[in-house]
Image (cartoon, rainbow, N blue to C red):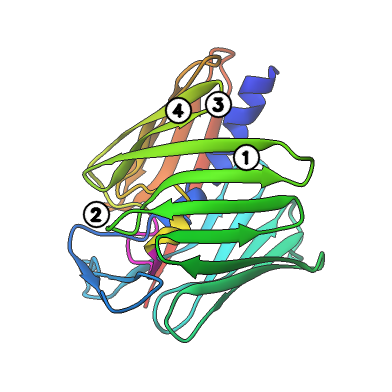
Amino acid sequence: MTRFTTKYLLIATIIFVLALISCTSKEQKKNTSEATTNEQVSENKTSTGGVKLVESIAGVESTLKFEYDDEHRVVKVSYYYDDTNIPGDVIVFTYNNDGGIESNTIVGSLSILSYAKNGSVITQHDDYGSYSHTIDSDGNITETETKYDSGNTENVYYHYKNGNLIRMNMDGGYEEYKHDDKHTPFANCNGPRWFRFGKSHRNNIVEHIFTPEGDPLHVIYEYDKDGFPTKSFITFESGETAITTYTYFIK
């Protein structure tokens, strides 16, 4: 298996974990007085009138399970790497009084990711370095400057259209995305827009182009009657197919 196939298999598992940051819908309620740009989405009601939230994402080699507070914000993500009922990693999200994310902690490793907001810049720190995210008037991240503890610096620039991230320009190449017109699994998730960290997708990714190397990633979905994906399929030149399954609950 090539390293690119391995990368794609991983993406098949985490592609919608990155969509934690895609807590949007076509109609948005914004509290413009809030410094952290906390976004309350217009809920996509199911056919029975309830609010559908993603409960788990089962990928090639791992399963992720999500827990929410009463405001439909993700407060815990548990990673299961085998068939046991004991999670290998747990990430806990903490929100401040304004509804913005204050920190997330990887339980067990005591690794804490903290955030601070100053005007249009979000500063993020972890065990490897510091990150400065520039935010536009809609709360989307348009630029990320990474300063690693090793002394290296990297810049990434983000471009959006119709609520979706369509291109990322970075040192040595770029990535492009194409989308369907359906709900993402996290369509009813509430949270600050800037926490998307440049992976903002209102709709589901159907094509992911890597440059300067790597074949395009194509994703095919099955949907439920409410327009939420229940399965995604990625087939590689080798004939291997990565299947990701999404389950939901009604709140």
Tell me the crowding category of disc 3: few under 14, some 14 to 19, or many 20 or more residues within 10 angstroms, Cα based.
few
Mark 3 to mark 4 CA distance (whole Å)? 11 Å
Q: Where's the C terminus, which quadrant?
A: bottom left
Q: In what element is the residue under mark 2?
A: loop
Q: CA distance from mark 4 to mark 1?
A: 23 Å
Q: Amino acid at mark 4?
A: Glu
Q: Which residue carries the number 2 mark?
A: 225
Image spot of residue 156 (x, y percent)? 50, 37
Where is residue 112? Give x, y as percent: 71, 67
Three-letter code, disc 2: Lys
**Residue range corresponding to the magenta coloring:** 185-192
Secondary structure under the numbered disc 3 in the rendered image: loop
Above or below, 89 relative to 178: below
CA gap, disc 1 to disc 2?
25 Å
Q: Which residue is mark 4?
A: 175
Q: Quadrant of residue 165?
A: top left
Residue beneath disc 3: 171
Is label 2 in contact with label 4 (beta carbons under 8 Å)? no
Q: Quadrant of residue 178?
A: top left
Task: Tell me which numbered mark, 2 or 3, is placed earlier along the sequence.
Answer: 3
Give residue 236's position: percent from left, percent from top.
53, 19
Q: Position of residue 225 (x, y in %)?
A: 24, 54
